[in-house]
Structure formats: structure tokens, C-alpha cells
Amino acid sequence: MGPPGGYLTRPRVRYRSDNLAKLHEPAAAADRERFDALGIRTVVDLRHDGEFARTGRVPARDGLAFRHLGIEHRPGDQAATGPLPDPWRYLAGKLGEILTDGGEEIARVLDVLAHAEGPVVFHRASGKDRTGVIAALVLTLLGVDHDTVAADFALTEHATAALRADRSARDEGREPGREHYGRAPEAVVRHLVDDLDSEYGGVAAYGAAFGVPGTTVAALRTRHLLPLRPLVRVRPRRVIRVSVRHPLGRFRV
């Protein structure tokens, strides 16, 4: 299900990614072409200062705005964690730390997403945890139900094998020490949203606690939602079917 009240999320206005500094690499020509084809106008870099210093920023382009808003203030290493009885509860707790420590920066990220012109991409080193948190916050503020938010977060599971292989290559062929490395199951974001409900009274209240005004939430909805358009087909004296159409598909009601 999408947002309530006859809306669907607007496509091609927001993207999340792994480290876009990779676009500097000679082997990334095809990725640079794809990036340009998306018409990205703003890049938001969520990495902490150490990550940014190691690899630099996305290549500069004419007309491309760049914002470095590192939201993590207690960086850790998932691959080095000890045995965990409940790794998904643990990961949700670490993401909760990011929400608390980086609340002011997250408020600024949401402001960019609400008011930027043209498509926006937000990225971090692997495009999993911090980007997943931002996506979950945005979708929840748009009114998307929790099941859909959780399913969106878990799409990163398709990249788990690649994330683990990349980490192994950086560690001279050694496998990541823990089975949860590179994982993004639905349980993580479900725990996180439940925690926000318990601690703040919901995502909107969390945002308000860190300075996200209602006008920014309204601007997010205006920018990121599409109203469904009713289509009524009428024969004399009776309506034979009511459906709604929008550019992504057709939904009967």
C-alpha cells in the first residue's frame, strides 16, 4: 500500500546510493553515464568526516549542488562486532544512535529533500544503513505504511553478496567476521520505527524534536506525492466501473 488519501509516491525525484566518489574511477564510465542520464541536480553525502576524507566527493558537474551532511557521530565497524544474540535488534539500536546523535543533520537533509529543485540522490559508503534510515523517515512522513517502508529498506538485501565481497577484497580476502555484515532485513527498520514510536510518539514527532517544522513535511508531501486521478466510465443510467489511473499503473477501487 502507498500513502493514504489517494496519493502515490512520485517517481524519479529521490534516489539513494553507495559511495558516489567512485564515479572518479576510470572503470566507472558506464556509471557516470547512468548518473548523468538520471538528471541529478543535488547530491547529499551522509558519510562521516573520516570516510569523506579518504575518498573525496562526487565529481563536480555544472548545475550539480553538493551538500555534505554527515549524520553519524559514533562510527563503528559491523564486521568487527562480537557474537550477537539478536543482530537485528543490535543494528536497530546502532541506527537509533545515529538518529539521536545526528538529529540536527537529519533535519537539514529532510529540508534539502523537501526544497531542492530536480532529482536528489543521498548516499553513504555502502548505501545501506544511513541511506535506509533517511528513506524510511521520508516514506513514513509521506504516509507510507510500515510494511511498505520495511520492504523498501530490505531491498538492500539484494546487494548483500556484493557488499560482503567488497569488504573481503579490502581485507585481503578475509570474510567479514559476522553473518549480519551487509544485511538489511525488514526486522531492523521495524525495530527502529517501533523505538521512535515509543520514545517520541512517531516519526513526525521525532522530526519536530530536532527542528523539522510542519512546513517542511508539507513541502516533502507536495514534492514527493502524486494525486491519483479518478476515471469514471459511464453508460446511460449507470456507472459500469470506477478506477484510478496514474503514470505508474492502474488501481481499482
Image (cartoon, grey):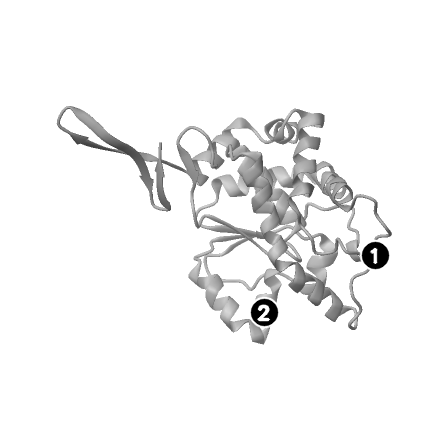
Q: For mark 1, give the secondary structure.
A: helix
Inspect the image, locate mark 2, and give the three-letter code of the amino acid beneath it.
Answer: His
Give the quadrant of residue 187: top right
The single residue placed furthest to the right in the displayed view is 82
Q: Residue at x 72, y 27 (%)?
A: 199
What is the x, y in percent for residue 103?
68, 37
Real-space CA distance between mark 1 and mark 2, rounded to the nearest whole angstrom = 29 Å
What is the x, y in percent for residue 145?
54, 34
Q: Residue at x 45, y 57 (%)?
A: 63
Looking at the image, tell me whether mark 1 or mark 2 is earlier in sequence order. Answer: 2
From the image, which quarter does the C terminus lie in? top left
Q: Residue at x 43, y 47 (%)?
A: 11
Residue receiving disc 1 = 80
Q: Tell how many labels.
A: 2
Residue 236 seen in the figure = yes
Residue receiving disc 2 = 24
Is 188 or 211 nearer to us in this picture? 188
Residue 13 placement, left or right of 109? left
